[in-house]
Structure formats: C-alpha cells, structure tokens
Amino acid sequence: MGSIVITGAKGQLGQQLLRVGADQSLPVVGFDSATLDITDAESVRKAVTPGSVVINCAAYTAVDNAETDEAAAFSVNEAGPRTLATVCAELDARLIQVSTDYVFDGTATSPYETDHATGPVTVYGRSKLAGELAVHEILPTASVVRTAWVYTGSGSDFVSTMLRLERERDTVSVVDDQIGSPTYSADVAAGLLELAAYPAPPATLHLTNAGQASWFDLARAVFEGVGADPDRVLPVTSAEFVRPAPRPAYSVLSGAAWANAGLTPLRPWRDALAVALAKCT
C-alpha cells in the first residue's frame, strides 16, 4: 500500500485520521479545501499517486443551508467524489468514500442494512447519495462507508455543545424522538484505516459505534459523564425544534456487513463516549 491521502483534513474526521494514522506510523498525508480542490482533476492528480488509498472526508455538511444552496452541496458531495473516482481509476489508486445515514428516509424501525433501499428527503442526503452512485459507477473497487452522529467532543459538535450548555444553563431541552448511533470520530478513523489495508473490501459498509440512543439519551450520558445531574436534560419533540431540513426519525446503521467482512466492529457508544469525555474535560 502506498500513501493514505486524506481529503477534508481539517474536519473532525480528517483530523482524527491524521492523528490515528500518525500514532500507527502509517504514511498519511492530509489536504484541506485550501490545498486540494477535489472537483478539479488536475489538482487531484497532483495529490494522488498510483497505489495510494484516498479517504474522502471532504463534504458539504451544512444540512440546513443545503436546502437553499443546492449547487454548492452537489459540487462538493457529488462532483468531488466523481472527480476523485475518475482520477483513482486512471492511477490505479483506491478510494474510500465517507457517506451518511441521510441517504435513507429515516422511517425504518430496525437498523438499516447496506442494501436497504435509499430515499433521502433532504438536499444534503440527495447530494451524498449522488456521490455514492458516482463512485460506484466509475470505480467499482471503491468502498462507500456510511457513518452517522459523529462527534469528537470539541468544536461545535453535539457532545461539545452539551458540555458547554451544561456549564451555562440550569436545564437543556433535547429532542427524544430521533434515534441513531452516537459515534466517536477516533473510532471511525481507526476503522477507516483498517479498511484502507483490507485487500478486497465490500462496495458499501456501515461504520458506527454499537447500540442506539436518542439525542436526549446522548445528552444525559454526557451530563452523567462529567458528574452533572442528567435530570437537567429535558425531553422535547422534533416538532418543537423545526429546522429547514428534516432530521431522520430513525437512522441506526447495521454493522453486519462490516463484521461479516472480517473487520473489527466498533465498541458500544457509551464506552466510546467515556473515552471521548476523558480527553476533552
């Protein structure tokens, strides 16, 4: 295996890939949007070499803004992966495309398998699905890896926000009718790097920490994890927090395909959260 090229290297997952890769003494190299335009083939050709593995973490992730900025969302989330796949095919390089639970409609009641019918209901979801389809069409050896509810515990992610609100407010209201799998970015990074060394990966995989929770459950777990009273977190419905883009009511992703491929399943989400909180508090 040649170098491991990380796009979107300044995002939370990209940063973790660089950190975990360095810890494992892997040949990781990172590019952000200022140093690599993933929609420009010539720019990509300068970053990718034959035999390398590209892990594409670059994405337009402003879910609400995408509803009124469709062109920008599709440029990054569809045209970008299409260009990466085209260049990887030319250079005999591998591509791992990071995708999202938003490619599903959120109406399931049991974990989504990799072959479950997609049906995105947001511009963001449609743009990410378009990226998946482009990658599969152009580079059949590529792997699409869907993840969800990713946090690090810093910046503006959900866990970091709960830590801040715990310090600032007496109570915090959090929706309890959206169910998913809270997923620690460092664990996703380790999984993606394991996949990068895998000789014949499946075309589509799901990668999240094990188990499921509502945002309300996760917020309570954050409060408990820092010794605060979890009853300060109050449940509300999604109807009380209307957003421009609807959130999936249920977006738990099954890890069966990942495990069946012989890859290491991620630990339970509560165990991962404990580790994350220990690092950021």
Image (cartoon, rainbow, N blue to C red):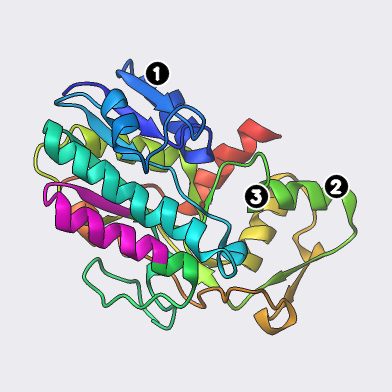
For the record, the magenta segment spans 127-145
- Classed neighbour count for the residue bearing mark 1: other residues with Cα under 10 Å, few (<14), some (14–19), many (≥20): few
In which quadrant will I find the C terminus?
top right
Which quarter of the figure has residue 214? bottom right
> Relative to the observer, which residue lies in front, 138 or 147?
138
236 left or right of 38 in image: right
Q: Percent from the top left, x then y, of residue 248?
A: 50, 75
Residue 45: assigned label: none
Q: Which residue is mark 3?
A: 159
Q: Work out how far the residue at label 3 is from the one at label 2, CA to CA, in angstroms.
A: 13 Å
Q: Percent from the top left, x then y, of residue 252?
A: 41, 68
Q: Amino acid at mark 1?
A: Ala
Q: Earlier in the sequence, mark 1 or mark 3?
A: 1
Q: Percent from the top left, x then y, of residue 261?
A: 15, 50
142 left or right of 112 in image: left
Q: Earlier in the sequence, mark 3 or mark 2?
A: 3
Q: Name the residue rendered at 43%, 61% in the picture.
A: 211
Helix, strand or loop for disc 1: helix
Q: Amino acid at mark 2?
A: Arg
Q: Which residue is mark 1?
A: 22
**Residue 264 in sight from this viewpoint:** no
> Relative to the observer, which residue lies in front, 127 or 223?
127
Inspect the magenta stretch and tell me whether residue 266 lies in it: no
Residue 167: assigned label: 2
Q: Name the residue rendered at 46%, 78% in the picture.
A: 121
